Image (cartoon, grey):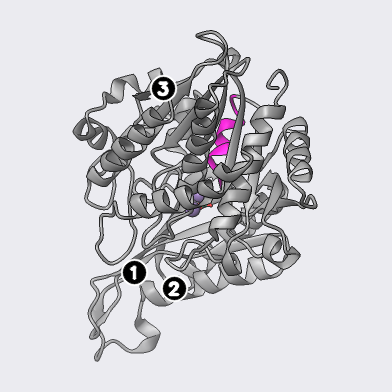
Amino acid sequence: MTGTTTDTFGAEIMSRIDDLAALSESPDGLTRRYLTPEHRQANDLVGRWMGDAGMTVRQDAVGNIIGRYEGVSEGLPAVLIGSHLDTVVMAGKFDGMLGVITGIACVGELNRRGRRLPFAVEVVGFGDEEGVRFQSGYLGSHALAGNFEPALLERRDADDISLAEAMTAFGLDPARVGDAARRAPDVLAYLELHIEQGPVLESQGLPVGVVTTIAGATRLAVSLTGEAGHAGTVPMTLRHDALAAAAECILAVERVCAESPNLVGTVGQIAAEPGASNVIPGSVRFTVDLRAAEDPHRTTALDELMVLLEAAAKRRGVAIEIEKVHEAASVPCDAQLSDLIAGAIERSGWRVQRLPSGAGHDAAAMAGLAPVGMVFVRCEGGVSHNPAESITAADAEAGARVLFQVLNDFPGGS
Ligand code: GLV
Ligand code: MN
Ligand code: MN
């Protein structure tokens, strides 16, 4: 990407980001969950862009959209570039989408130059990374990496639709999810470009960085069952208030995580029943999201938390059920790919900043199949999972240049 064309990449990427952000389940902000009509629209749009960039396009057995640009001959092993097209609720528009759109921009540039590499390049728009709908992240990338967990097909969303039913409604065959799995010899490497979602690059005055490790995560679904009752008549000492018990549990999560600089913990979702101002809450469900770059920090904290939550519930005469709904070990990025990315950053004229990722990424799941490398792009104020998520066109351009350079520097690529 040199000369005048470079300046158009940032603008094209930003314009496509806006096009994708318009595909939302909610008119109030961007929400696009896995296997929804908006997911289909996103696949259609991204598939069109892939075709325009010279790729052959297909949707795989789990709903990932995949474009393939052949190398110097047909059928060569591929370098995969990917990220996700699903979002959190009331999301920012760059998380995930930037990596897919930038991958397409890089292939489009190869195509414009009429260049074929000694390997194929594929761009993947994963259908589910955030795990919002079925409370299990990486469904798309796990399936592609051959690690889809069939028991998840029975998992139900908030509308009581199972994953298997949602797949069928989307036109997929749940019995054939295994067909999405790729063979290791066919995949040389997996590259992902993503916004940093934190403040480090901005604080360093750098547009791009190299990811060292992707933090591990555990998600819990906690149910507390106490006793609903009259808010005016039941003395405080005789209550089994499920929401008061939940409050104690939430503070325990905060306390355990605040005790260590290596841990973060979040309760992001809570629902109390029956939900009236004059009724003592009888049951509560809430989630816990626990993360650490080093797995032992997370697993030790998890053990400690289990004891604290059970004790809080017992003290209040409230029944507790804790279900582990998602677990992902921390994943180091491949050293050689990271050096390749670092070299590309240097050659583009920037100092190399290496940094860990506190957020999860499809790269973590893809590491089960191939070496993975990640490029981070600076985002304003480090804000993410928020409609205010923002990057500049110049930084989108910088990320695209680095990714394009990595493709060119990839062994056998130049
Ligand atoms: C995905 O964005 C996650 O880290 O939860
Ligand atoms: Mn996200
Ligand atoms: Mn993401």
The reply to whether residue 359 is visible in this rendering is no
> Which residue is denoted by mark 3 in the rendering?
180
Q: Indicate the position of residue 226 as horizontal and vertical percent values.
A: 34, 69
Q: Indicate the position of residue 357 as horizontal and vertical percent values.
A: 65, 51
The disc, 1 or 2, on the residue closer to the chain's N-terminal end is: 1
Displayed quadrant of residue 345: top right
> Which residue is denoted by mark 1 in the rendering?
226
For residue 224, side relative to residue 302 (left or right) = left
Q: Hey, which residue is sitting farthest front in the picture?
A: 4
- Asked whether the beta carbons under mark 1 and mark 2 sit within 8 Å of each other, the answer is yes
Q: Alpha-carbon neighbours of circle 2 within 10 Å: few (<14), some, or many (≥20)?
A: many
- Vertical order, 348 against 234 (above or below): above
Q: Secondary structure at mark 3?
A: helix
Single out the mark in the foreground, 1 or 3: 3
The disc, 3 or 2, on the residue closer to the chain's N-terminal end is: 3
The magenta span reads 359-369
Type of amino acid under label 1: Gly
Q: Which mark is residue 245?
A: 2
**Is 67 or 220 nearer to us in this picture?**
67
Type of amino acid under label 3: Ala
- Vertical order, 402 against 50 (above or below): below
Q: Secondary structure at mark 2?
A: helix
Q: Residue at x 71, y 59 (%)?
A: 206
Q: Alpha-carbon neighbours of circle 1 within 10 Å: few (<14), some, or many (≥20)?
A: many
Q: Which mark is residue 174?
A: none
The disc, 1 or 3, on the residue closer to the chain's N-terminal end is: 3
